[in-house]
Amino acid sequence: MIKADNVYKSRKLIKVSLTYCEENKLINSIKITGDFFLYPEEALDQLESSLIGTKVDKYTLRETIEKALKQVDVFGFDQYSLTDAILGCLKQEQDSSATGKR
Amino acid sequence: MKFKKIRLLETGFNPGPWNMALDEVLLNNCIDGSEPILRLYGWSPPCVSVGYFQSIEEEVNLDRCSQLGVDVVRRMTGGGAVLHEFELTYSFITRKFPFNILDSYKWICAPVTVCINKLGFKAKYVPLNDIIVDNKKISGNAQTRKNKTLLQHGTILLNVNFEKMFSVLKVPPEKLKDKMIVDAKSRVNGLNRTFEEVASQLKASFSEKFSAQFIEDEITEIEKEDCKKKVAQKYSSHQWNHRR
């Protein structure tokens, strides 16, 4: 299991912390924090739950996020920026592996 | 959208957990027929509040807060971390409001913007939740909706202790602009008006905006008891404050 984090500046700041399986790239756990707004607020817990078991892949992530946020008012990010924020975790992790900081 | 009357609560300076608990109690106790509430308050001791979706450990230097006697509390509203010290905070709670979220922010930020302008500044509302003067944030606002009731609370900055602010908040470089600072020369020191001056103008602006008369009131014994419970069970609990 690999742990990775990323800070991503969209209209608001998104911080993603996740663990995923190295072999199949499925998300095992994920925490999304930041200074954004979601209405209703409980939607973030549901979004995080829906991302568990999702493959860290651009189109799968975008589709899952879009579906989870369908009835939600979000200010500060969207399905595109959150997808980029999650994918950025992998890049951060790969960069730290390459420099031996993992 | 107009109101005949607004219940006015000027609740003084209180600790952060108590302030957040009272806002939630007032929101929860609002029922059909309740007058809207304008609450004006301050914070003592100083307190960092973090947004509902933020991680307290990621945003706040907890050791530094402890050394400086600064409280820390999680809000029930989104948005960013704020050091509440030299400011006026307001809450507006209402059952009647524009359904669209952007419209409702704009609607409540309007009298706040007018207040700042009447104090001699050129303030501008910037969606979603900021009011700026000279391109720098002077007021941050956040709202939530529960049980068909809207609560919006927000701050009007009177003064800033930058050294303290940056020692208690872990501000990432990406957020420096939002925290009113690009470089030392572009710092904003708040409105440099007294709490009472701003409170008086804010009341006038809300009254004018909603064509409403104020009913000057105090919190009831029931609200006080509910608030004490909410402080103990929620806003001073590790479970709530460290939930993310």
Image (cartoon, coloured by chain):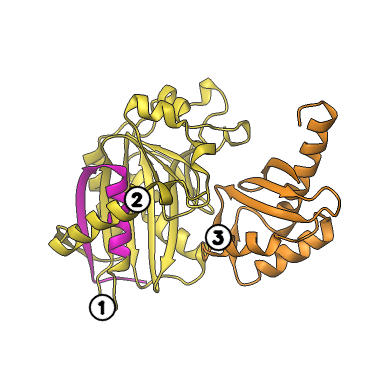
Q: Which mark is residue B235?
A: 2
Q: Between marks 3 and 2, how big is the CA–CA gap?
A: 21 Å
Residue B22, quarter of the rendered image: bottom left
- Relative to B117, say whether A55 is above or below: below
Task: Say what secondary structure mark 3 lies in.
Answer: strand
Q: Pointer 1: residues within 10 angstroms few (<14), some, or many (20+)?
A: few
Instruction: Name the residue beneath numbered marker 1.
Output: B33
Q: Position of residue B79 (x, y in %)?
A: 50, 49
Write down the region rendered in magenta.
B1-27
Given the image, on which type of amino acid does mark 3 rest? Leu
Judged left or right of residue A21, residue B223 is left
Q: Pointer 2: residues within 10 angstroms few (<14), some, or many (20+)?
A: many
- Relative to B65, say whether B5 is above or below: below
- Relative to A73, say whether B50 is above or below: above
Q: Are marks 3 and 2 in contact (CB under 8 Å)?
A: no
In the rendered structure, the colour chosen for chain A is orange
Q: Are marks 3 and 1 in contact (CB under 8 Å)?
A: no
Can the viewer see residue B212? yes
| Residue in view at x 82 percent, y 26 percent | A99
In this rendered view, identify the residue nearer to me: B96 or A97.
A97
* Chain under numbered label 3: A
Q: Which mark is residue A38?
A: 3
Given the image, on which type of amino acid does mark 2 rest? Tyr
In the rendered structure, the colour chosen for chain B is yellow
Judged left or right of residue A15, residue B117 is left
Can the viewer see residue B198? no
B230 part of magenta stretch = no
Task: Say what secondary structure mark 1 lies in.
Answer: loop
B17 part of magenta stretch = yes
| Residue in view at x 68 percent, y 58 percent | A78
Given the image, on which type of amino acid does mark 1 rest? Gly
